[in-house]
């Protein structure tokens, strides 16, 4: 039995002989029953894939032609639980590819769970990179403010001359 389900139903609504794989006895109930047996497995697979994608604590958000950034390593490790009042030394290594400008900057943007600045008015750590591809490491030190539930670290590659970028890393640290 092929799982042609919904497409058989739709094809038959357009033209009863539209798809030779769809038999005349594929009733709407049978088709929906087949889909009903497949759907829980499909949902479970999607949940498992999503969990794997975020299990590392690192996500890539968006992307753009001509430049990209990729996670290599970080200390503390992504997903490490931090404590309010804790002094944190952050070291982050990323791989980058920059083709749209002669140089750019990799920036560490620290934010709270609501996307507000973690430490308002404080300069963001950054490192300059040049056209081509390679790896770079940047470091920062900060104290986790009381009342913070999550520290979000956004890491964009900002090509020179760009005022808006697309494609950045997001690393999250829960706070207890």
Image (tube, rainbow, N blue to C red):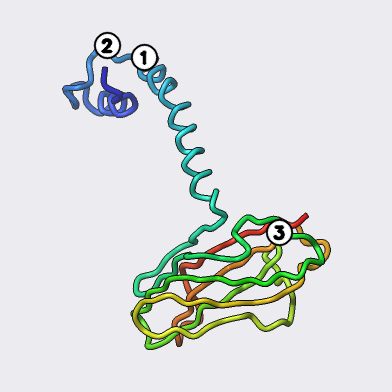
Mark closest to the chain's N terminus, 1 or 3: 1
State the residue at coordinates (48%, 76%): 157
Disc 1 secondary structure class: helix
Q: Quadrant of residue 90?
A: bottom right
Residue with the mark numbered 2: 25
State the residue at coordinates (29%, 25%): 4
Task: Look at the image and tell me in which quarter the C terminus lies.
Answer: bottom right
Residue placed most toward the observer, 7 or 55: 55
Residue placed most toward the observer, 161 or 67: 67
Residue placed most toward the observer, 175 or 104: 175
Q: Are marks 2 and 1 in contact (CB under 8 Å)?
A: yes
Q: Which mark is residue 167?
A: none
Residue with the mark numbered 3: 150
User: Which is more foreground, mark 1 or mark 3?
Assistant: 3
Vertical placement of residue 42 versus 122, above or below: above
Residue with the mark numbered 1: 30
- Could you tell me how far apart the alpha carbons at marks 3 and 2 are, in whole angstroms? 55 Å
- Could you tell me how far apart the alpha carbons at marks 2 and 1 are, in whole angstroms? 9 Å
- Could you tell me how far apart the alpha carbons at marks 1 and 3 are, in whole angstroms? 48 Å
State the residue at coordinates (61%, 73%): 109
Q: Are marks 3 and 2 in contact (CB under 8 Å)?
A: no
Disc 2 secondary structure class: loop
User: Which is more foreground, mark 3 or mark 2?
Assistant: 3
State the residue at coordinates (77%, 61%): 148
């Amino acid at each position: 039995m092929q799982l042609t389900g919904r497409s058989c139903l739709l094809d038959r609504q357009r033209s009863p002989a539209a798809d030779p794989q769809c038999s005349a006895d594929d009733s709407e109930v049978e088709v929906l029953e087949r889909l009903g047996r497949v759907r829980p497995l499909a949902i479970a697979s999607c949940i498992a894939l999503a969990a794997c994608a975020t299990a590392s604590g690192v996500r890539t958000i968006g992307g753009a032609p001509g430049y990209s950034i990729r996670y290599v390593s970080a200390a503390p490790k992504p997903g490490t639980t931090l404590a309010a009042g804790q002094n944190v030394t952050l070291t982050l290594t990323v791989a980058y590819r920059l083709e749209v400008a002669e140089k750019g900057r990799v920036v560490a943007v620290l934010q709270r769970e609501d996307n507000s600045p973690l430490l308002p008015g404080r300069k963001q750590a950054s490192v300059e990179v040049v056209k081509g591809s390679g790896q770079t490491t940047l470091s920062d030190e900060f104290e986790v403010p009381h009342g913070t539930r999550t520290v979000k670290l956004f890491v964009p590659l900002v090509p020179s001359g760009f005022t808006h970028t697309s494609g950045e890393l997001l690393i999250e640290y829960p706070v207890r």
